[in-house]
Image (spheres, rainbow, N blue to C red):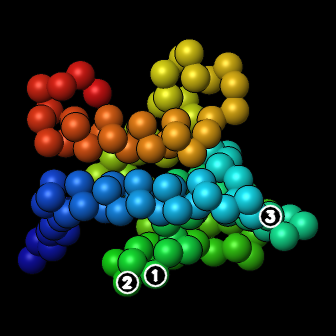
């Protein structure tokens, strides 16, 4: 017997990416949260350093969907790989950002822009990713 794992429909991935934008927008207003593409999530001196996936895994909506952030190791961890959960890895890895952005620290807005680019691509794959 062959077991197949089904992948969620693109609409599920799009909804998750839109929810990720909500999480980043909320986090960007908090002085105790710093966007850090190199950490899933870590706390130091009361400040949370986290990437898109790490922040999402701390949000109740995402936790209900099965994505959770674990803060028990140096740079944290998440329970589901971004590619599997969001249907893409592009917005989640520094090397996938445009070269002109990689000469500086990335911001919440850079993450939001990357998520919006990915949503546009999933809605119309003819768009250059």
In terms of depth relative to the viewer, which is nearer, 64 or 26? 26
Q: Identify whether 46 is placed above or below 49.
A: below
Q: Can you tell which of label 2 and label 1 is closer to the viewer?
A: 1
* Residue 90, position as x, y percentages in the image: 41, 38
Instruction: Mark 3: give few (<14), some (14-19) or many (20+) Cα within 10 Å.
Output: few
- Along the line of sight, which residue is nearer the eye, 22 or 13? 22
Q: Residue at x 67, y 19 (%)?
A: 103
The alpha-carbon separation of the residues under discs 3 and 1 comes to 20 Å
Q: Which residue is mark 2?
A: 64
State the residue at coordinates (52%, 40%).
109
The answer to whether 104 is drawn above or below residue 85 in the figure is: above
- If the image is split into quadrants, where does the C terminus sit? top left
Residue 44 percent across, percent down from the top left: 86, 65
Q: Quadrant of residue 15?
A: bottom left
Q: Is residue 28 left or right of residue 14?
A: right
Give the alpha-carbon distance from disc 2 to disc 1, as whole Å: 6 Å
Contact? badges 2 and 1 (CB < 8 Å) = yes
Q: Nearer the viewer, mark 3 or mark 2?
A: 3
Farthest residue in the front direction?
29
With 26 as the anchor, is 106 left or right in this view?
Answer: right
Instruction: Tell me the residue that label 3 is attached to.
Output: 47
Would you name the residue on which mark 1 appears?
60
- In the displayed structure, does residue 66 sit left or right of residue 29? left
Quick one: label 3 or label 2, which is nearer the N terminus? 3
- For label 1, the SS is helix
- In this rendered view, identify the residue nearer to me: 19 or 53: 19
């Amino acid at each position: 017997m062959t077991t197949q794992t089904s992948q969620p429909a693109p609409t599920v991935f799009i909804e998750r990416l839109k929810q990720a934008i909500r999480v980043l927008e909320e986090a960007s207003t908090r002085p105790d949260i710093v966007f850090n593409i190199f950490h899933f999530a870590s706390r130091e001196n009361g400040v949370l350093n986290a990437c898109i996936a790490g922040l999402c895994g701390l949000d109740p909506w995402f936790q209900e969907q099965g994505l959770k952030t674990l803060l028990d190791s140096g740079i944290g961890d998440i329970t589901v790989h971004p590619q599997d959960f969001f249907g893409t890895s592009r917005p989640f890895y520094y090397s996938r950002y445009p070269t002109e952005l990689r000469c500086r620290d990335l911001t919440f807005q850079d993450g939001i822009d990357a998520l919006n680019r990915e949503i546009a691509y999933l809605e119309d794959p003819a768009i250059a990713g």
